[in-house]
Image (cartoon, rainbow, N blue to C red):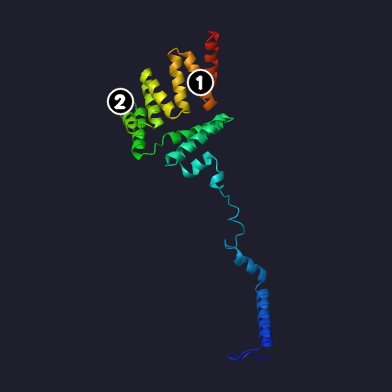
Amino acid sequence: MRFCPGRPLNNRGRGQALISRFSLVCVLAVAFGATMSFDVCAQSKPDGGHGNAQASKPTPPPKSRMTPLQRLMKDGVPANSTERARLRDNLYALLATAAEKKAAKKITSALQRVWLTSGSDTVDLLMLRAIKAQKGKKPAVSLKLFDAVVDLAPDYAEGWNRRAYLYYKQRNYHAAAGDLRRTLALDPKHYRALSGLGTILTESGDEAGALKVYERLIDVNPNAPGAQSTYKELKRKVEGRGI
């Protein structure tokens, strides 16, 4: 039976025509060293026939399953104050249970990033300039800038903490202790403020007060450098006096 263009075929004719075409395709495929199955598989791969190249790439865990450190590395410090406080508290919880100093160091580095984020571009800029002036041994300039920070953002704990350190370097221990207490009122687990206050109390002879501060410090950051040995020494002295 011949195929005539323009002439409708019956069902039997259509079937024979399809069989003839399929036979021709198979002959051509064999001639060119190809197979139908290969062509189908190649077309079905979205990566252009490179196998599982895309599937082999590691996919990040869902955001809900990320640790605070993973979230911080991925998204940075949250701009929202509530989310920032939640992240800070989660990092403190990790710090309190860190088994090794290496793990604790990563957490403290993350916390310091959170501390330096006030939520205000103006305050953040003043902080950076104040710290730069302090490192450049320009204490007068640094103090003015820290004064501006605490005036503009009295609820920003790190502003008080940084100014306290500057006061301490200037041997103004009374002012430093006042700023550290203000820091701890805003952020009771600020381990650097606890360490600074404990140092000032120890140097001023208030060993009983320093002992209480170091107890809090160890609860917050058990791996704080020198905290454990200082605590034991203070405890020995205080308990030796029967206090």
Q: Residue at x 50, y 32 (%)?
A: 108
| Disc 2, SS | helix
**Does the rendering let one see residue 190?**
yes
Residue 226 horizontal side relative to residue 153, left or right: right
Q: Position of residue 190 (x, y in %)?
A: 46, 28
Quarter containing the N terminus? bottom right
Q: What's under tag 2, amino acid-wise? A: Ala
Q: Which of label 2 and label 1 is nearer to you?
A: 1
Q: What's under tag 1, amino acid-wise? A: Tyr
Q: Position of residue 171 (x, y in %)?
A: 37, 18
**Does the rendering let one see residue 225?**
no
Kindly give the residue lying farthest to the top in the view shown. Answer: 241
Q: Earlier in the sequence, mark 2 or mark 1?
A: 2
Which residue carries the number 1 mark? 214
Q: Position of residue 35 (x, y in %)?
A: 67, 71
From this view, report whether residue 178 is shown above or below residue 28. above
Q: Position of residue 138 (x, y in %)?
A: 32, 26
From this view, report whether residue 171 is shown above or below residue 33. above
Q: Residue at x 52, y 18 (%)?
A: 230
Which residue carries the number 2 mark? 140
Q: Which of 105 and 34 lies nearest the eye of the viewer? A: 105
Q: Residues within 10 Å of mark 1 (few under 14, many from 20)?
A: many
| Disc 1, SS | helix
